[in-house]
Image: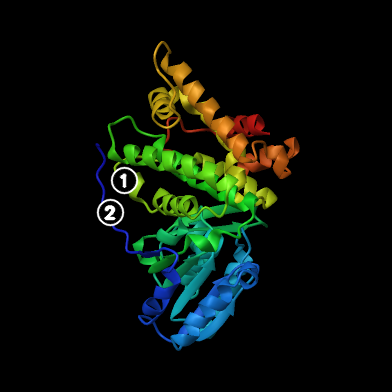
Amino acid sequence: MLGTFTYCNPTKIIFGNDALDHLGGELAKYGKNVLLVYGGGSIKKNGIYEKVLSVLKAAGKEVYEDGGVMPNPTVEKLYEGCERAKAANADLILAVGGGSVCDYAKAVSVSAYCKDDPWQKYYIRFEEPDCKIIPVGCVLTMVGTGSEMNGGSVITNYAEKLKIGHVFGEQVFPKFSVLNPEFTFTLPKYQMIAGIYDIMSHILEQYFSGSDDNTSDYLSEGLLRSLIHSADIAVKNPLDYEARSNIMWTATWALNTLIAKGKTTDWEVHMLGQAVGAHTNATHGMTLSAVSMAYYRYIFNYGISKFSRYAINVWGVTAEGKTEKEIAEEGLLRMETWMKDLGLTMRLKDLGVTAKMLPDIAKSTLVMDGGYRVLDRADILAVLKASL
């Protein structure tokens, strides 16, 4: 392990089927004004809204609401949230929902008192906050993004055809997150498997880089094996608590910054997926699954040893009598077969993308370094064409 790093994760996790019982204790640490942030209203249908509201009232909080957060939160919604947070004089933003709601809450937390345009400051210039930050807490109802234990926040600007994530420092991490696996049971299958692939992609994008013997890679392999095993169970029985709890916990560890320590990372799949999302408003996890196989087959020869290791340690490919390339190719084929069996979207055309759209999507794709090959615009277009 050759990298040097500093590690701190300040988020308190409350996990289990009684997790909400402990929310009141966390609320007591903050002032009386709470901005309750949630999505399209599913939490009102499944009863979670009433449960959370009951805890807030019992804690003596003044509750202000900011509902209607969309799956790909927009810059316009961010501006609206800033006004709501200031009008409420919010002492705490409580996000109840999935990763988009948590991302949005963090964006509001650093933007409400920002003197500049937050889109320009945080998502174009990638500057850090220098204003008052409103604390955030999360009650998770959908897993995948890991937003409950990191500083990431993705916002979409459809006018500019850009979907950009800013990874803020530890001061923006949620102060606490309530994780009850049972809150994910009512999620439609499409959303569940999209979240599962988002988790897998997070791990892979930290795993496929570097060549040193790195503890983080061993952790990633264990997380991947756990995810694959539990996903197979959950797809057949979505109410299997053990499987859903393992998926929820894996999602958190997949992107709470731990497995990135000591190494470089390759986030190009996310950049491709986010560009597709900016042009289609497609479900995030499905944009990733649609481009992943084409991307990894495009670059695997440049990191052949790691791809071979992945095939053996994650997918159980036997190495005897095979070249590293043959091993790596078999691993990718097993991954692709598993993805199809899970029900993931494998082609961009199934998300509404047309060949005519590809040059514009390529222009919207941010180019990242840190991986086995840094793509240029021609490479990005080639990957998108292979994904179509």
Are circles 2 and 1 on residues that touch, CB within 8 Å? yes
Judge left or right: residue 130 versus residue 268.
left
The x, y position of residue 204, in whole percent, is 45, 39
Q: Is residue 68 above or below residue 290?
A: below
Q: Residues within 10 Å of mark 2 (few under 14, many from 20)?
A: few
Please tell me whether mark 2 sits on a helix, a strand or a loop.
Answer: loop
The disc placed on residue 261 is: 1
The x, y position of residue 79, in whole percent, is 59, 71
The quarter of the image holding the N terminus is top left
Viewer-proximal residue, 73 or 252? 252
Q: Is residue 79 above or below residue 55?
A: above
Judge left or right: residue 330 versus residue 254.
right
Residue 176 in view (yes/no) = yes
Amino acid at the residue labelled 1? Lys
Q: Residue at x 47, y 40 (%)?
A: 229
The x, y position of residue 214, in whole percent, is 28, 36
- Disc nearer the start of the sequence (2/1): 2
Q: Is residue 301 above or below residue 87?
A: above
The x, y position of residue 151, in whole percent, is 42, 60
Viewer-proximal residue, 237 or 138? 237
Amino acid at the residue labelled 2? Tyr
Identify the residue position indicated by label 2 in the image: 7
The quarter of the image holding the C terminus is top right
